[in-house]
């Protein structure tokens, strides 16, 4: 794994101007430029950048040489000189040639949205899988842009655009980079195989899986910690946690499920990052139930929900049973609360309210519950009794001679999974 080149004594904080270009293509895709720009501000601050100003431009198509118009380049240069900026961060993805041209014209470090997100991920990755995924995404992004990374790679002062693969690694030839990518893919395949073995073990053990999904910073990790006492990193920032964390959640009636926190989604999540993290994101596909956590206090709530649904669609998980948890209601204004949908499949909560946490476990239990069946288990078949407690909700039990009668609420999926063992013990209704 390549190392990061940092010199803490000479590191200079990035002082940046943010740039957004709204093209006709962006308008057709339905992407909200203002939401994207607001997120860029948050992303920059998360990366430790001081945001000095924001420049916007509307243009039919990007300029092939500068990305923005030549006049806007001059405006950006004057703004940077006046404010003392050393970096320009673009809200869209730039080509290597555009980066090189802008650097020469502006004498600034040029970063685009994708590189900024990859940089944040590089600082967040802690596990072997996360580190491999991030470096793979960074190298896949940088390979076709090596000729446009001169200023970013030559500066030894650290800052955004220099975390992750070390500078010397990126200055080697393309063949070396391709070899590294091949090796990372091989390592990731091994990790994916191990993850699949864990999934298969959970499937065979009859573990019911519930996945927490949502926009970044919606409160998923906080909810996981409050529900399961999980020791997870929690911070009010974008992408505070990358690696999926699974913990056992106790439901009413002694039934247990596996609750998994997944990486947060964001608008325009880089393609290379989605590809590298696909094995992680696909944890959602294994879930029996999806909990969509929403920051109900966000003014962009609706747009964020649409982004999450779009990514779930791309992952093939849009058809999963889903409960929407409108989190952070303690931060909402009364008029915001009134606008939240109500009814089946929706729940307004605060992750710090014990009553709300109890309501969550109850609604999960209800959602996963199915038909009520009676099982007659011989007294010497303790293995079958423990199986019933593990895969269903035992409502009551009674004794009939040496047999034990269990009244169990069991969803169809779990019963189908274990019918080869359970069917012979079901009492006729």
Image (cartoon, rainbow, N blue to C red):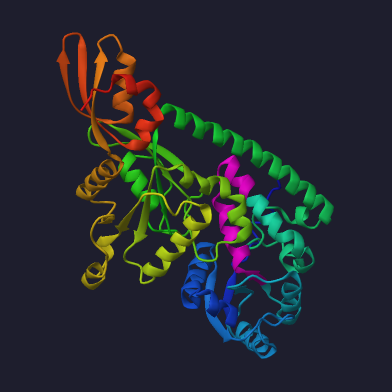
In the figure, is residue 331 to the left or right of 276?
A: left
The structure residue drawn at horizontal position 52% and vertical position 70%, both measured from the top left corner, is 40
Q: Is residue 374 above or below residue 236?
A: above
Nearest the viewer among 369 and 338 is 369
- Taking depth in this image into account, of 394 and 101 the one nearest to the observer is 394
Chief SS of the magenta region: helix
Is 246 above or below relative to 274? above
Residue 411: tell me if it is visible. Answer: yes
Q: Which quadrant: the C terminus?
A: top left
Residue 416 position in % (x across, y down): 38, 32
Most distant residue in the front direction: 428
The front one of 280 and 395 is: 395
From the viewer's perspective, tell me whether residue 6 is left or right of residue 228.
right
In this rendering, does residue 23 appear at all?
no
Q: Is residue 172 above or below residue 388?
A: below
Q: Position of residue 397 (x, y in %)?
A: 18, 22
Q: What residue is drawn where x is 64% and y is 45%?
A: 132
Q: Is residue 216 magenta?
A: no
Give coordinates of residue 209: x percent, y percent.
40, 39
Q: Residue at x 42, y 69 (%)?
A: 303
In-front residue for pair 285/241? 285
The number of numbered badges drawn on the structure is 0
**In the figure, is residue 277 to the left or right of 6?**
left
429 versus 13 height, above or below = above
- Quarter of the picture containing the N terminus is top right
Q: Which residues are magenta?
A: 110-133
Whole-percent x, y for residue 340 in the image: 27, 66
């Amino acid at each position: 794994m390549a190392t990061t080149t940092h010199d803490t004594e000479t590191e200079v904080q990035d002082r940046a101007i943010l740039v957004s270009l709204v093209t006709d293509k962006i308008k057709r895709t339905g992407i909200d430029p203002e939401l994207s720009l607001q997120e860029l501000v948050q992303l920059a601050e998360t990366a430790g950048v001081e945001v000095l100003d924001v420049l916007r431009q509307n243009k039919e198509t990007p300029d092939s040489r500068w990305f923005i118009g030549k006049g806007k380049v001059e405006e950006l240069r004057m703004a940077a000189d006046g404010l003392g900026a050393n970096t320009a961060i673009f809200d869209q993805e730039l080509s290597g040639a555009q980066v090189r041209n802008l650097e020469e014209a502006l004498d600034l470090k040029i970063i685009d949205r994708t590189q900024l997100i990859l940089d944040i991920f590089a600082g967040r990755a802690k596990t072997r899988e996360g580190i491999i995924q991030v470096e793979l995404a960074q190298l896949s992004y940088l390979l076709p842009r090596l000729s446009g990374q001169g200023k970013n790679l030559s500066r030894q002062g650290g800052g955004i655009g220099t975390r992750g693969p070390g500078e010397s690694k990126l200055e080697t030839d393309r063949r070396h980079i391709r070899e590294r990518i091949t090796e990372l893919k091989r390592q990731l395949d091994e990790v994916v195989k191990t993850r699949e073995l864990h999934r298969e073990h959970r499937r065979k053990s009859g573990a019911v899986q519930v996945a927490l999904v949502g926009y970044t910073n919606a409160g998923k990790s906080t909810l996981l910690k409050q529900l399961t006492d999980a020791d997870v990193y929690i911070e009010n920032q974008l992408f505070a946690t990358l690696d999926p964390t699974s913990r056992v959640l106790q439901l009413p009636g002694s039934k247990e499920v596996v609750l998994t926190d997944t990486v947060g989604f964001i608008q325009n999540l880089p393609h290379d990052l989605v590809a590298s993290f696909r094995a992680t994101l696909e944890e959602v596909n294994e879930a029996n139930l999806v909990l969509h956590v929403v920051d109900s206090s966000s003014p962009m709530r609706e747009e964020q929900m649409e982004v999450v649904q779009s990514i779930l669609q791309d992952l093939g998980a849009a058809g999963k049973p889903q409960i929407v948890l409108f989190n952070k209601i303690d931060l909402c204004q009364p008029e915001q609360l009134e606008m939240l949908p109500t009814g089946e499949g929706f729940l307004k909560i605060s992750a710090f309210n014990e009553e709300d946490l109890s309501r969550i476990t109850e609604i999960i239990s209800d959602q996963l519950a199915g038909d009520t069946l009676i099982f007659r288990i011989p007294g010497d078949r303790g293995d079958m009794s423990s199986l019933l407690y593990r895969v269903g909700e035992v409502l009551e039990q009674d004794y009939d001679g040496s047999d034990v009668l269990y009244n169990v609420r069991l969803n169809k999926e779990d019963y189908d999974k274990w019918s080869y063992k359970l069917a012979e013990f079901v009492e006729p209704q």
